[in-house]
Image (tube, grey):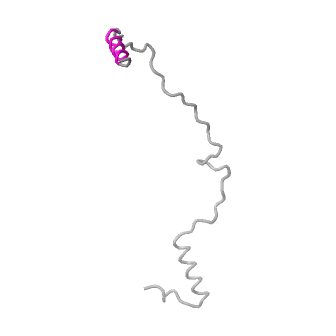
Amino acid sequence: MRFIKKFENFVNEDAEAPVKPAVKPTTAPKGPVTRPKRPSPIRIDKPGVTPDPKAKKTTAEDVANRFIEELHQKGDLAKNYIK
């Protein structure tokens, strides 16, 4: 019985309570606060020292001449390899 009376009181209070109209906020909601990114101590885009070239640029003629020289040192002829 005691629970039924509490339930009835709850229902009556809820029915008698005035409904409040929804209030729109006057300020715009703010987004999340972001911190500025710190620059990385490692620079990938540009090396600190200009590297020296490891070898000179070789052309197709340089390669062919080197091949012929190696063949002459072995005692072979280039004609044996050209078809």
Q: Residue furthest front?
A: 1
* Near-viewer residue (23 or 50): 23
Q: Quadrant of the N terminus?
A: top left
Residue 16's place in the image compared with 71, above or below, is above
Is 7 covered by the magenta stretch?
yes
By secondary structure, the bulk of the magenta-drawn segment is best described as helix
6 vs 39, left or right, is left
Q: Position of residue 33 (x, y in %)?
A: 54, 27
- Could you say which quadrant of the image residue 19 lies in? top left
Q: Quadrant of the C terminus?
A: bottom left
* Near-viewer residue (60 or 29): 29
Q: Position of residue 17 (x, y in %)?
A: 35, 9
Magenta stretch, residue numbers: 4-16
Is 46 covered by the magenta stretch?
no
Residue 40's place in the image compared with 33, above or below, is below
Q: Residue furthest right?
A: 49
Q: Residue at x 58, y 65 (%)?
A: 57
- Could you say which quadrant of the image residue 67 lies in? bottom right
Q: Position of residue 14 (x, y in %)?
A: 34, 13
- Could you say which quadrant of the image residue 59 lies in? bottom right
Q: Residue at x 64, y 61 (%)?
A: 53
